[in-house]
Image: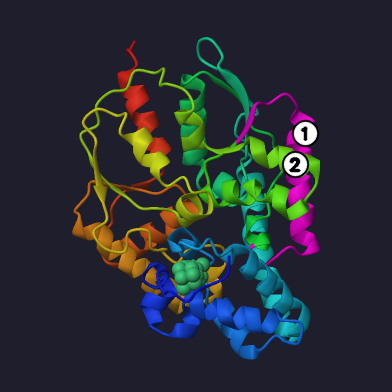
Amino acid sequence: MSCTHCGLCLESCPTYTLWGTEADSPRGRIALIEDSLAPDGTVSAEMAFHVERCLGCMACMTACPEGVPFADLLVAARAAIDRELPRPVTERARRHLSRTALARSGRAAVAVRGRELPHHTPARGDPRGRVGLLLGCTQRARHRRIHEATLTVLSAEGYEVIAPRLPDCCGALELQAGPHPHALRRAQATIDAFAAVGGVDRIVSSAAGCGAAMKGYGHLLGTPQARAFSSMVRDVHELLLEQPPRSPLAPLALRVAVHDACALCHAQRAGATPRELLRRIPAIELLELPREAGACCGAPGLYPIAQPEASAALALRQARAVLEVAPDVVVSSDHACIAQLQRRLRALEQPLPVHHPIELLERSILAARPTG
Ligand code: SF4
Ligand code: SF4
C-alpha cells in the first residue's frame, strides 16, 4: 500500500486543483511526509507548510486504487510537526484557542439560551430500537433545527432516542490536529457518556464530521471498549436505511442540489446514503453538481481560520457549481458545510436555502400527517 505515483488522485484533490503545485497534491504530500518520517529524516518546514495546507478531506483516499492510507500518514505528520517543529508561543496559543473556541462557544450558547433538547424522545408506534444521539457542541448551539428534525424523523420511524447532555463535544476539531492527549480525553469522555446512558443499540450523529470522528475512536484509542463503541456508530442516513421506511411521505416538488460533505462521502464512505434516503420522497428531483462534485467546500475543522483565502476560494467554487444547476434548495450532511455554503451564496447575492437532508425528510413526514 505505498504510493506508485500514478497520479490518479490529482484531479480529486481540491488544493492541487486550486494551486496546481505537486507539493500540494496527495502524491507530493506523501513524498514529503515519508521523507520526514523516515528513520534518518527530520520534519522539514516545507513538509509542515504543505501538510498545513491540506484539508484532510480524504478525497485522495477515495480516488486511490492502491489504498494508500493517507489519513494515517496525515495524522502521523501532524503529530510529528507538533512534536518536532516548535512554533512561536503566540502561534501555539492561537492554534489552541482556535481549537477550543468553537467547542466553548457552542456550550456557552446552549447555556445562554437555556433550551436543551429533550433528553428522551419516545418512538411513535412500535419501537424498532433505542439509539443514542450525539448533540455535540456547535451543532447543538447553532444548528438546533437539524437536531429537532432528526428527533422528529427518528421518532416517526420508530426509534426511541436518548440525547445525553454529555458529551459536550466529541473532539472532532482537536482530533484533526492529531492524537494529542486533549483529543484522546474527549474521545474517551464521549464513550463514557454513552456508556452511562446504557442500553442503546446504535450511536447516531447527524453531523458528518462528528460521526467520522466517533467511527475513528476504535483505531485511535485501540481499546476493546473504543472498538465496540465505534462499531455502533451510524450516520443518521445510514441508520434510517437499515430498515424499510415506516412513515407516509408527502410529495415535495423541489429541485434539490446535493453537496457531498467530505466527512460523509470520503471519511465514512457513505456518500450515497443521503441520496438514497431523499429518493424516498415523492416528486423530489435530485441534482448532481456538474463541476467540483466531491470537491471540498473548504469548511473542515479549523481550515477557514488557518487558511482563510483557500477556504473562501473553495467555497466560491462550490457555490458557483450549486448555482449552475439552479436548485430550489441545497442539502449537505454537515453543519459546517451548510454554514459555509450559506455564507458564500449570500456573498454572491444569490442566497438559497441550505439544509440538512433530514430536514427535508421531516418536512415530507409532517406534511403527510393528517391535520386536526
Ligand atoms: S486530504 Fe484532500 S486536500 Fe489533502 S491531499 Fe488528500 S485530497 Fe488533497
Ligand atoms: S496516492 Fe494513490 S492515486 Fe495518488 S499517486 Fe499515489 S498511488 Fe496514485
CB atoms of marks 1 and 2 within 8 Å: yes
Q: Is residue 273 visible?
A: yes
The quadrant in which the C terminus is found is top left
Q: What count of labels does the image hold?
A: 2
Q: Is mark 1 within 8 Å of ligand 1?
A: no
Kind of residue sitting beneath label 2: Ile
Q: Secondary structure at mark 2?
A: helix
Q: Secondary structure at mark 1?
A: helix
Residue to which mark 1 is pinned: 195
Residue drawn 39% across the image and 30% down it:
362
**Stretch in magenta:** 176-203
Residue drawn 67% across the image and 60% down it:
175
Q: Is residue 189 found left or right of 317 in the rendered image?
A: right
Residue 162, percent across and down? 65, 28
Residue 75, percent across and down? 66, 67
Q: Magenta segment, principal secondary structure?
A: helix
Q: Nearer the viewer, residue 193 or 200?
A: 200
Residue 133 sits in which quadrant? top right
Q: Is residue 272 found left or right of 336 in the rendered image?
A: left
Kind of residue sitting beneath label 1: Ala
Residue drawn 36% across the image and 23% down it:
366
Distance (Cα) linking label 1 and label 2: 6 Å
Residue 20's place in the image compared with 314, above or below, is: below
Q: Residues within 10 Å of mark 1 (few under 14, many from 20)?
A: some
Q: Is residue 162 visible?
A: no
Residue 216's place in the image compared with 345, above or below, is: above
Q: Nearer the viewer, residue 305 or 79?
A: 79
Residue to which mark 2 is pinned: 191
Q: Is residue 146 found left or right of 212 in the rendered image?
A: left
Residue 228, percent across and down? 72, 37
Q: Is residue 197 magenta?
A: yes
